[in-house]
Amino acid sequence: MMHGPLGDRENLSEAATNNSLVAAFERTLSLINKILVALAALALVAACAVLSYSVLGRALFQMANYWQDEAAVFLLVGATFMTAAYVQSQRGHVSIEAFVGLLPPLANRIRLWLVDVASLLFCAFFTWKSWTLAYEAYSDGQVSNSMWSPPLAIPYGLMACGMTLLCAQLLLQIIMPLLGAVRR
């Protein structure tokens, strides 16, 4: 469920502007997220084009299909992981909202902050394992088990980069309410 206006996000930009380092971090991450969303949109269009080419080539011309599926999967993996931070910045990830209407605004802000902390812990572990996987794939020269044999460091690297950005976004969302609380 996509959140509407959240009470925990009011005046956080003001709190960030009081700290120039956090404000610069927020602007930089926002710019990176916007660029990656545009690139992910292009990747999705490219994946559609590759898969359409694959289907038409196979159906009309009996062409071999040995690279199209993997290329589309690599594009989809990149689009999914590289935009995770943007989705988090919009609070667009799936969440259960059973308590939102029952809890007072302060309790909801605390609940969201605790969820962000728990999410950061999980995503930090996932990021560490992703970078380990990407490094192993790169250093060992691992490739996929197809005739095309692209390096597996590509999707693993995209996954690791996307998870790193997601951790940065979660860290920002954890810090911002604390700055707002200190400011008051």
Image (cartoon, rainbow, N blue to C red):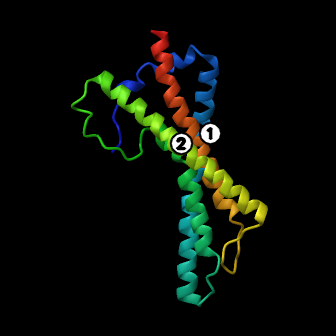
User: In the rendered image, which residue does mark 2 sit on?
Assistant: 85
Could you tell whether 167 is left or right of 99 in the image? right
Instruction: Name the residue: 55% across, 73% down.
Output: 51
Q: Residue at x 64, y 80 (%)?
A: 66
Going 47% across and 34% down the picture, which residue do you hit? 117
Residue 89 in picture, x, y percent from top left: 48, 37
CA gap between label 2 and label 1 equals 10 Å
Q: How many marks?
A: 2
User: Would you place residue 41 above or below residue 111 in this image?
Assistant: below
Instruction: Judge from the rendering whether residue 90 lies leftward or rightward of residue 136; answer left or right.
Output: left
Element class at badge 2: helix
* Residue type highlighted by circle 1: Ile
Q: Quadrant of the C terminus?
A: top left
Image: 160 above or below 50: above
Q: Please say if the residues under marks 2 and 1 sit with CB atoms less than 8 Å apart.
A: yes
Instruction: Locate residue 166, reporting x and y percent.
Output: 55, 42
Q: Residue at x 68, y 65 (%)?
A: 152
104 versus 132 height, above or below:
above
> Where does label 1 land, which residue?
32
In the image, taking residue 2 as reference, residue 121 lies left or right, namely right
**Residue 36 x %, y %:** 60, 46
Few, some or many residues within 10 Å of mark 2 (<14, 14–19, 20+) = many
The residue closer to the viewer here, 40 or 172, is 172
User: Considering only vertical position in the picture, is 23 above or below 151?
Assistant: above
Three-letter code for the amino acid on which mark 2 is drawn: Ala
Quarter that holds the N terminus: top left
Neighbor class of circle 1 (other Cα within 10 Å; few <14, some 14-19, many 20+) is: some
